[in-house]
Amino acid sequence: MILPTDTNIDNISSYFGYRTLFGSSNFHDGVDFPIVQNSKVYSTLSGIVTFSGFTNGYGICITIQHDNGLKSLYGHLSEGYRVQTGEYINAGQVIAYVGPKYLSDGRLNGYTTGPHLHFSIYDSSGNLIDPLNFEYKKSNNL
Ligand SMILES: [Zn+2]
């Protein structure tokens, strides 16, 4: 699989599992990469974009259904360029850029304390699993 950012797989600010955020314990359903705003975000595998829009938890986010049954999610993205629902995406393709903490209309860009990429993986049954169960290589920056 392709790393979703130009960083290293050990550069993670929040792991999959229980954590404390905003004073309460919750389940963190992916990993966070602490990278700066406007960094490129890559699709980890090829597939079809199944969502590209705003949710309260992830802010502006994208989900991609992959050919092998996995689904990936990328959260806290920018309001600029991003791929749209229904597009077919190649592995390693730029799909969006890391967004700000607040969107232009003042809304919080999901449950976030500052710019970073949230990355989740669902298995073929729709269960969230630890993205670090897989091996990654860096994108060729397509
Ligand atoms: Zn996160």
Image (cartoon, rainbow, N blue to C red):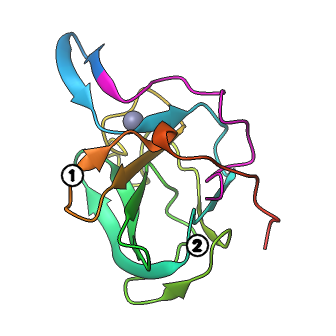
Q: Which mark is residue 127?
A: 1
Question: Which range is magenta?
Answer: 1-17
Amino acid type of the residue tagged 1 in the rendering:
Asn
Left or right: where does residue 136 sit relative to residue 31? right
Q: Position of residue 2 (x, y in %)?
A: 65, 58
Above/below status of 26 relative to 137:
above
Q: Main secondary structure of the magenta part?
A: loop
Q: Position of residue 106 (x, y in %)?
A: 35, 46
Q: Position of residue 63 (x, y in %)?
A: 37, 66
Above/below status of 16 relative to 52:
above
State which quadrant residue 23 falls in. Answer: top left
Q: Nearer the viewer, residue 6 or 104?
A: 6
Q: Which mark is residue 81?
A: 2
Mark 2: which secondary structure? loop
Amino acid type of the residue tagged 2 in the rendering:
Tyr
Left or right: where does residue 97 sit relative to residue 14? right
Q: Point out the frontmost of discs 2 and 1.
A: 1
Mark 1: which secondary structure? loop
Can residue 105 be seen? Answer: no
- Quarter of the N terminus within the rendering: bottom right
